[in-house]
Image (cartoon, rainbow, N blue to C red):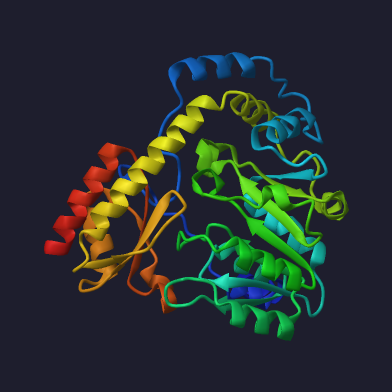
Amino acid sequence: MNDLTHRIAGLIRPEIQTLAAYHVPDSGGYIKLDAMENPYDWPPEIVHEWLAELAGAKPNRYPDARAHALKQAIRQAHQVPDSAELLLGNGSDEIIQIILMAVAGTGVTVMAPEPTFVMYRQISRCLGLDFTGVPLRADFSLDRAAMHAAIETHRPAVIFLAYPNNPTGNRFSLDEVLDIVQRAPGLVVVDEAYAPFASHSCLPLVDQYPALVVMRTLSKLGLAGLRLGYLAARPEWIEPFEKVRLPYNINVLTQLTAAFILRHPAFLEQQVQAILAERSRLHAALSALDDDLAVYPSEANFILFRLKRVDAGVVHQRLKAKGILIKNLDQAGAALAGCLRVTVGTPTENTGFLEALADALAA
């Protein structure tokens, strides 16, 4: 160990040294079906109007620190209850970080059913918080008895519930979610990253349950490049979280762009409907391969499936060799052993994936 390595080892917290950085693979040259993005571009006429909107930007000035115009656009577009306040973040990741920084302290526990979004655990560990994952059942449904027992034992300060869940795609029942909300000793964050593709939302309920807050992102809707998320909650929750939020965290271009797009929802809704139609087609086509794989239901813009007879890592590499990039979850092991996840793309992309998958399974 050289002097610099020794110095770094002495300065960086041990729990950070044991973590692996979040890996984003190089996607250049691939049909990209690994990151749950909206695959459709904006119509040219929308792009033209958007660029005209950006012409009024003043990048030499700090953005509106409270993002008033953007918050109003979110309220109107997503029917946020009047009684709720909004906290904006640089993607949902920053909001997760803000929440957990606010509750950080000795003996604080964060909880989520697992497998789920990896950043709940990752950010908790970065902040030195105890994280307890409660295993889902074999079909990825919520184990209510196990959640009850874990809540009673660990008394978590924060519980994250992805609704629908990532990477499994299923949505827990509203009854199960509200049961947890009413049992929780602290805060329950319902993460609705995939709300545009789901059949139900908890957003209208934030003023009815004191422990409930709802987090959303615009990334899956078609604005992944902006990195914008928001938290809707009672003002009593937003006040302490605002003390943690760094000033000017939402830049002027993001504020202008997101507010503009939310005032033009028609094309985004058309794209959502196209994705839903392709999700149904993709799910049916994958389900027809029942000798080779098991397909899980999804209320998101992706589908999880498990390989039965061919190694998932091998199939992933064969798809990659054919220019198709999907997510290999097999390397996570445990409940996700043998699993791959594909984002719903355009009809052409989905057909290319299905053809490549058939070849990969037959090879």
Q: Is 272 rendered above or below residue 93? A: above
Position in image of residue 222 (x %, y %)? 50, 36
Which quarter of the picture shows residue 177? bottom right
Q: Is residue 279 visible?
A: yes
Q: What residue do we see at 78% from left, 62% from top? A: 211
Position in image of residue 16 (x %, y %)? 64, 71
Which quarter of the picture shows residue 85? top right
Q: What residue do we see at 57% from left, 50% from top? A: 200
Indicate the quadrant containing the N terminus: top left, top right, bottom left or bottom right.
bottom right
Numbered circles on residues, count? 0
Which of these two is toward me, 135 or 178? 178
Indicate the quadrant containing the C terminus: top left, top right, bottom left or bottom right.
bottom left
Q: What residue do we see at 28% from left, 61% from top? A: 316
Q: Is residue 123 left or right of residue 184?
A: left
Q: Is residue 73 left or right of residue 356?
A: right
Q: Is 117 rendered above or below residue 29? A: below
Residue projecting furthest to the left: 363
Q: Is 238 rendered above or below residue 128? A: above
Q: What residue do we see at 58% from left, 41% from top? A: 218
Q: Is residue 145 left or right of residue 221?
A: right
Which of these two is toward me, 8 or 38? 38
Which quarter of the picture shows residue 339? bottom left
Position in image of residue 279 (x %, y %)? 36, 47
Q: Is residue 161 left or right of residue 293?
A: right
Q: Is residue 1 visible?
A: no
Position in image of residue 241 (x %, y %)? 82, 53
Q: Is 258 rendered above or below residue 122? A: above
